[in-house]
Amino acid sequence: MIIVLKQNPDQAQYEHLQNWLKEMKLDVHISEGQHSTILGLVGDTSTVDIDMISAMDIVENVKRIQEPYKAANRKFHPLDTQIDVEGAKIGAGAFAMIAGPCSVETEEQIVGIAKSVKEAGATMLRGGAFKPRTSPYAFQGLGGDGIELLLLAKKETGLPIVTEIMDLSQLPLFDDVDVIQVGARNMQNFQLLKELGKIKKPILLKRGLANTIQEFLMSAEYIMAGGNEDIILCERGIRTFETATRNTLDISAVPVLKERTHLPIVIDPSHSTGYSRYVKSMCYASTAAGADGLIIEVHNDPAKAWCDGQQSITPDAFREINKGVQLIRKDILSLC
C-alpha cells in the first residue's frame, strides 16, 4: 500500500500518521519528491482502513499495490535510486563502466588490467576471486588471496572493486570489498540474500539463468527487506533454446525493469553472448535501451586467460567501446 501526501503536509499530522502506522507493526518507507511525499507500507495492510486515511487533510491519495515486491517497486519510490560506490555513482543519470577479468590470476595481471581499464574510462574494477564453474575440475579462483590482490589493485588505481560471493561462510572476507556480486546461480539463495540485507554495502544482483523479471525483483526484495537498499540489478542473459550464443541477452529487460523498479540496472554483454566479437554491439544496444551501466570482462591476454577468455575483450577494445557508449549516451540525452 502507498499513501501519497499533499505538498507541505502539516508536520503534527504527518508525525501522528507515521506513529499510528508503526503501531500497526507496518514498516514505513518514505520517499520525498519535489512535489509530493510517498509513504510505502510493508507488512500486513489488510486491516488498514483506507477510508480513514483518505479522510486526513494531509493525504492526497491511497493505493493498494498488487505486486508482491514492495521496497523495490517504483510505485513506492518514483524517483530513480542513485548508488554511490566510493565516489563512483550509478543510477539516476550516472552511468557505470565496470571492467576487469573474469578471474584474478596474478598481481601483475590484475594490477595491469586495473590500470589499463581506468585509463580507458572504467569507473569500477571487476574480478572473480571465487569462481562458480560447471566442471569441478575447472579453475575455481584464488579465494581470499584473490580478494587481497583486488584490494592491491584498488590501492594502485583508486577503482572500487566488485567481486562475487559464493557462500555465507565467505562473508568475513568481503569486509573491504566495495560491491558484493551475487551470481546468477545464487539469485535465489534466500539465506544468503537475507544476510546481505543486514549489511550496509552495495550488492550487484545478477538475474538467474531461467528466472522471470518478477522473480528477479523478488530476490532484490529479500535484500531490501533486511534494510539494505543499495541494490544494482544485472541482466546477464537467460537460457533459451538458442545455441549460437552462450545465453540470450534480454535487452527488453531494461525498459521493463525501468518501468517496474527504481533500482539501477546494468548489462553484462560478456556472459550473455559468450563471445568477445559480440560484446561491442551488445554494449551499444544496452546503452541505447537505457541501461545505467555495463559490466564487461577485460583481459590483457584473452587467449591465455585462466577463465572465459573467449568472451573477454582487450583493454584497447574496451577503450573503443567506452568512446562509442559515451557518444550514444550523449545522443540519448540530446533527445530527452
Image (spheres, grey):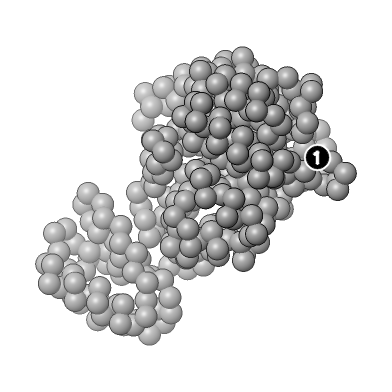
Q: Is residue 159 left or right of residue 50?
A: right
Q: Is residue 277 above or below residue 144?
A: above
At x 37%, y 80%, the residue is 25
Element under label 1? loop
Instruction: Choose between 155 and 19: the one closer to the eye.
Output: 155
Q: Is residue 133 left or right of residue 287?
A: right
> Residue 285 in the image: x percent, y percent?
58, 29
Taking the image as shown, residue 278 lies to the left or right of residue 322, namely right
The correct choice, above or below, for 254 with respect to 334 in the image is: below
Query: In the image, residue 3 lies at what x, y percent?
Result: 30, 67
Q: Where the N terminus falls, by quadrant? A: bottom left
Location of residue 96 with respect to 55 vertically, above or below = above
Kindly tell me whether residue 252 is visible in this rendering.
no
Q: Residue 336's quadrant in the figure? A: top left
| Residue type at numbered disc 1 | Phe
Which residue occupies the foreground of this view, 179 or 280?
179
Q: Nearer the viewer, residue 324 or 230?
A: 230
Q: Which x, y percent locates residue 44?
A: 43, 79
Numbered label tally: 1
Answer with the quarter of the image where residue 304 lies.
top right
Residue pictured at 13% horizontal, 59% vertical: 8
Q: Residue at x 52, y 18 (%)?
A: 120
Residue 193 place in picture, x, y as percent: 58, 61
Residue in the foreground of this view, choosing between 235 and 196: 196
Q: Which residue is mark 1?
A: 139
Note whether 181 is above or below 151 in the view shown.
below
User: Residue at horizontal 60%, vertical 25%?
Assistant: 111
Q: Identify the image quadrant of residue 331.
A: top left
Residue 34 in sight: yes
Q: Residues within 10 Å of mark 1 (few under 14, many from 20)?
A: some
